[in-house]
Amino acid sequence: MRTQVAIIGAGPAGLLLSHLLHLNGIESVVLESRSQADIEATIRAGVLEQGTMDILNNAGVGARMQAEGALHHGIELAFGGKRHRIDLTELTGKAITVYPQHEVIKDLVAARQAAQAQLLFEVSNVALHDTDTTKPSVSYVHRGEAARIEADFVIGCDGFHGVSRPAMPAPGRQDFERNYGCGWFGILVESAPSSEELIYAQHDRGFALISTRTPTVQRLYFQCDPADHVDNWSDDRIWAELHTRLENSDGWRVNEGRIFQKNIISLRSYVSTPMQAGRVFLAGDSAHIVPPTGAKGMNLAVSDVHLLAQGLEQFYGKGSEAGLQGYTAAALKRIWRAEYFSWWMTSLMHNFEDFTPFQRQMQRAELDFVVNSRAMATALAENYVGAF
Ligand code: FAD
Ligand code: DHB
């Protein structure tokens, strides 16, 4: 098979890129190792920046997000027994939308399938070839048959554990990494939201976060040992931990309900550069990871492919390689800013085992500074809404 752009991975990055290219008359094939049902049911991100919303709306895939997403004008920071509101809209003129990543995935899959896209699920043995030539190719197995796609470009949108990044040439490659030694325990709960806005809580027992999904489903997280196992946490133990970390004496309570999903993720920051080698490009989590505290991962995947689509449009439309050659530098500017903010929010809100008593005091002083200084609150708000 031959195509213009071969895309590995049908996460937000791969699906949106394929859709943006289609809108500009550029043909692509998307190879995904999981099933459609699986990608449409995997619970991950929830917070979309205005810029992400704009890109999805302009691409014609924002109708359901507009109708069902919840616009949030503020977030709360909880610490020392009090909650403090950061008014995102008053401070920045912008807001964020809570709309689950798997719903974005459903909208993108529906748009691609309506356009009869080449979107192949449950492929295996995906491998990149001839990556140092102008005719790269990708081999794979689909429905028991070995096949190969020859393309002008191969784009690795296959997440952190994919095959594309390891296939990039090692010389000149630089990896930056930080492991935080802590994890997030995430649950989905059948109950009305405990709060209209997200609450990020810092507590001596560790971080906790209240988010929402729908009027009848809550998304809650709390800091845990990344090596812990969900089976060690009975529902009662989870609720006890959340009540302790989130509540104070003002009478407000976290709403309990049936917990129908539990998972643990590990917090890390990671950037691999460059994001291009010849005709092979990386986008989204395949090139970089942020800890989830700043809610930036999916937003970065969207901004990466927005840039990459522009570069490919220039290449096919005007014969110019300028956009593609400038892709790594342009993408990294935003990525490093989001890496910084995610690292900062993580450091501000979590309880680290190796913290000295002095560092604990500094963390508390910084939280006080953020909620009592308009300048600091504005800095947080600008980063959170993605005004950079
Ligand atoms: P992925 O979504 O990982 O997609 C990669 C796809 O490639 C997958 O479907 C995978 O199956 C496929 N694949 C992998 N290997 C292969 C292969 N060899 N061949 C073919 N296909 C392959 N981000 C936010 O912006 N806001 C948030 O609020 C937020 N909260 C988060 C909360 C949690 C608990 C987690 C885990 C993440 C959160 N994120 C958030 C991050 C966000 O989910 C990711 O950054 C985003 O999914 C990245 O998209 P992607 O398309 O680059 O990669
Ligand atoms: C959600 C995830 C995040 O990482 C975050 O910072 C806020 C909300 C969520 O899943 O709703």
Image (cartoon, rainbow, N blue to C red):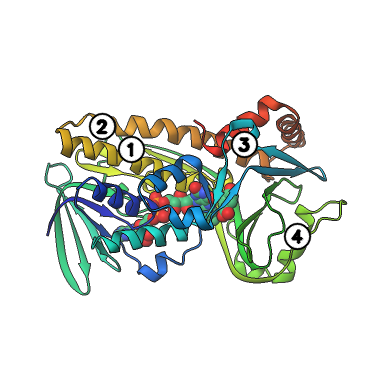
Contact, CB < 8 Å: mark 1 with mark 2? yes
The answer to whether residue 160 is seen in the rendering is: no
Mark 4 or mark 2: whose residue is earlier in sequence: 4
Mark 3 or mark 4: whose residue is earlier in sequence: 3
Q: Find the distance from the CA under tag 4 to the CA under tag 2.
A: 48 Å
Residue beneath the point at 79% across and 59% down: 253
Contact, CB < 8 Å: mark 4 with mark 2? no
Contact, CB < 8 Å: mark 1 with mark 3? no
Q: Find the distance from the CA under tag 1 to the CA under tag 2.
A: 8 Å
**Location of mark 4 (residue):** 254
Q: Give residue 127's quadrant in the image.
A: bottom left
Number of disc labels: 4
Q: Give residue 260's quadrant in the image.
A: bottom right
Mark 1 or mark 2: whose residue is earlier in sequence: 1
Quick check: 13 above or below 120? Answer: above
**Location of mark 3 (residue):** 89
Amino acid type of disc 4?
A: Val
Amino acid type of disc 1?
A: Leu
